[in-house]
Image (spheres, coloured by chain):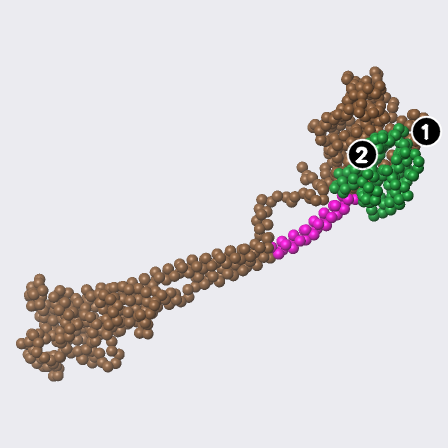
Amino acid sequence: MSGDAKPAVLVVEDERVVAWDLREMINGFGFDCYAIATSAQEALRAAETRRPDLVLMDIRLKGPVDGIETAKMLQEKYGGQLRIIFISAHSQSDMGPRAESVTGAVWLRKPIRAPMLRKTLAYVFPTSETAG
Amino acid sequence: MARADSLPPPPREPWAWIRKVLHHHLTAWVILVLSIGITALAWYISDRAQTKLLHERFVFRTTEVDTAIVQRMNHYELLLRGGVALFGASTEVTREEWKAYIEALNFAQQYPGIQGVGYSRLIPRQDLERHQQTIRAEGFPNYAIAPAGDRDEYHSIVYLEPFDARNQRAFGFDMHSEPTRRAAMDLARDTGGTSVSGVVTLKQETDQDVQKGFLMYLPVFSPDLPLNTVEERRKALRGFVYAAFRGKDLMGGIFGGRFTDLDYWIFDGETDDPRALLFQNHPEADLHAEHELSWLSRVDVAGRTWTVRFASTPTRLDQSRAQPLYIAFGGLLIDLLLFAIVGSLARTQERAVRMANAMTGELRRSLKEKDVLLQEVHHRVKNNLQVVSSLISLQLRKPENERARNALEECQGRVLAIALIHEKLCEVSDVAGLQFADYIRDLATSVANATETPASHVQLEFAMKPVVLDVDQAIPCGLILQELLSNVFKHAYPDHEGGTVTVELEEAGGVVTLAVQDDGVGFPTSFDPMTAPSLGLRLIRLLSEQLDAEVRTSSEHGARTAIRFPQRVRPSPGASPP
């Protein structure tokens, strides 16, 4: 874990360009996007190397396990205080009751633009320094 | 496109329920039970009607029997009256005259059943000897009144035709010496009319075929004596014209082989006392048995009452008893045919329904697959647009000049406006059109959030009615709105003072109106959106042309831009034709 106070963010997104864009934006907002995962397996491995404070999670992932299941697995392992932001082309209502099984999750709909992401991060981590 | 699980209902048929009922697999059984019930009822009614008819026929037959007896006995009475008249016409009737009279009547052929017609003469005691000698002198040397004995008066059968061997047995017999005959003779004498005796065994009977018999008497009086009182009639009596009947022969003559479908017993007197039985048409029939059909009637025979007991069975009266049987068997045949037809209808229908269900299921599955596929396509498009947006976003991060940065941001906004259309289409799974008010709400929020201006300073308001836009109109319309809104957020409030932006949407008479109104600084003087050179405004012009839209701007309380265009309605494949 690095010595500075920047919250550690794990991005789980199988579209590489989108993931890169997200990392740039998140880092620009004063967070530390320390890893990008494209599947549930990669996400769990990345979380093992460094425990994230926040996960940006796409619903559709590579592999058989989707984002909601991955989020649940992460929360089981690291506790309900692990914050999850779902980023999806689907709205929350499309996912039905499954989406509600993840504690304290926030939904952000694709396509994602910087101002909206900045506001969402500020909402999830109110005390963080969010100046670009 | 209609959703896969809501196929249009089949066209309404007013008699569809009949078809439905006819084709149900239980219907055949219900019809079978009902029709057998109806057949049973019809058989029952027919059987009862038949039985009633047979009862009526039975009663009618009995009256026929009664009438035949009475008529025939009336004939015999007339015949005897003719004999009496013969005596009235002449002082003395000779044996030859009597014989000629009876032969002329030819009753053996006309009225079979009569044993003989005779004359019984009254002989006072003092004339007995002279009478016997007179008859003996006529050629009957053995003539004597029987039975012998000393009596006040004697009656002797002097004439009896046909004078055959059987009848000769009665020649000279004194009927008055026997109580049953005497009663009838005295009654005839006292009343001056016809009388019939009770049951007797005739003198004519031999050892063989002994039958019960009876006699009918008419008195012959002296023509020159008064007959007003019983006493006068007794004094004036000269004898009796009489007829002797053997029961079986008589009834055989009357009925002649008719009425074999009945059993009947004829009794002398008011009751069916077996001792008074005169005749019975079927000797083997049992009077005392329990009879299905039974009747008792009384007939008047020359002042004497006879009782006739009838018995029969419906089967004997109508051996075929065909009608109820025809109804029962014919009805059952029809019932089974009906059952077979309706049953096969139901089976055919079941097969058809199974096939239709299989086909509908397949159709549903393929429609669902198509829906899923379309959603997938929209999802892919949206993902790709996200990639495009991310590419632009990444480009934005390179330190370029302000103009390039603005251009890229505008570009990204346009991409997102299109992406949002696909998102909406993704949600509704109806590719024909989308609820544009929902889209506007999301797009306006997205544009507001994308602006670096603190969003709380600008209030969004909506005055919208539900309007469904075709996807071909939704995309240019969405792009126009994107330009209008980003213009408002960029230029209307240059000093970040904030305000209210109102988006209006309505449709009336096929014309859609979309307007954006702000309360900011308004358009610059000498601003003309139709000639302004900026890319955004040129886009608005071009897209308006694509929509056949008319653009109006005004700048009274802030800026207002309104576009009006005819709504294009693409016939959706699910909808019924107009």
Residue at image coords 6%, 79%: B130
Q: Work out whether A97 lies above or below B297.
A: above
Which of the two labelled residues, at mark 2 and mark 1, occupies the earlier sequence position? 1
Q: Is residue B220 above or below residue B32?
A: below
Q: Which residues are magenta?
A: B345-373
Along the horizontal axis of the image, is B40 left or right of B147? right
Which percent across, then down, holds residue B197? 18, 70
Q: Chain of mark 1?
A: B
Q: Tag count in the figure?
A: 2
Q: Residues within 10 Å of mark 2 (few under 14, many from 20)?
A: many
- Can residue B342 be seen here? The reply is no
Residue at label 2?
Answer: B420
The 10 Å Cα crowd at callout 1, few under 14, some 14 to 19, many 20 or more, is few
- For numbered disc 1, what is the local secondary structure? loop
Query: The chain drawn brown is chain what?
Result: B
In the image, what residue type sits under mark 2?
Answer: Leu
